[in-house]
Image (cartoon, grey):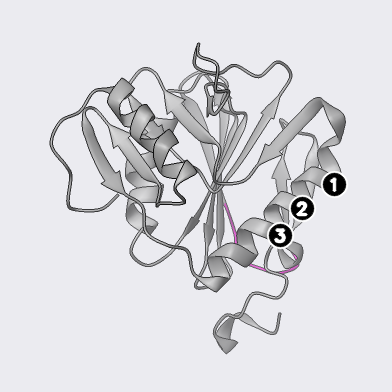
Amino acid sequence: MSAQPQPYITPEEYLAAERAAHRDIAGKHEYFQGEVYAMGGASRQHNLLATNLIVGLDTRIGDACNVYPSDMRVHVASNDLYTYPNVVVVCGDEEFLPDAYLDTLLNPVVLVEVSSRSTAQYDQEGKFLLYRNISSLRHYLLVDSQRVRILCITRLEADTWNFREYTQLTDQVVLSALEVEIPVSEIYRKVPLPAANGAL
């Protein structure tokens, strides 16, 4: 989130403004407990990683689940967060806010954030504390855009989570809730990173 919040507004005002902004091709914003935060633009690495994940997930999960890019807004009702994860996976019946738009999802199974230097701490600490209140959530992936590093946080029980880090291109990211594995090399395909990470 940006460090420059706007004055308090209601969720209804926020949603109306976001929907109007999308029609006008304006930027996206997060909403948290009455404050609105502008979301920054994405780097080339960020876009490549998100694209690789969307393709990799969609080719593996079959027709029972859907994969959405960052325009699918997610709402966490328990803490009043509205945000746009970089990749969203939902399985079974999709639940949306009770309005006609079908643009704000309530029951994701997998959420992915591609992290940069400026967002890494918030994505790993702040956002996880907010996302873990989603009862349907089974996996939260944090993908580093500066080096080969993927942190997969998996729900084992209601309030028990397992943290597993992948740092080698030969690793396979295990998403047990989807019954899929994705090679780290596929996620980082074509992504330019420092030479210390090895050739991609």
Taking the view exactly as shown, the residue that stands out farthest to the left is 7
Badge 2 local density, few (<14 within 10 Å), some, or many (20+)?
A: few
- Pick whichever, 7 or 150, lies toward us: 7
Percent x, y of residue 6: 16, 42
Question: Which residue is label 1 attached to?
Answer: 59
Q: Are marks 2 and 1 in contact (CB under 8 Å)?
A: yes
Say which mark, if any, is on residue 52: 3
Question: Residue 179 falls in which quadrant of the image?
Answer: top right
Taking the view exactly as shown, the residue that stands out farthest to the front is 24
Percent x, y of residue 26: 41, 51
Read off the magenta span.
165-170
Marks 2/3: CA distance? 5 Å
Question: Which residue is label 2 attached to?
Answer: 55
Q: Secondary structure at mark 3?
A: helix
Q: Secondary structure at mark 2?
A: helix
Describe residue 190's horizontal placement relative to residue 1 as left or right: right
Q: Secondary structure at mark 1?
A: helix
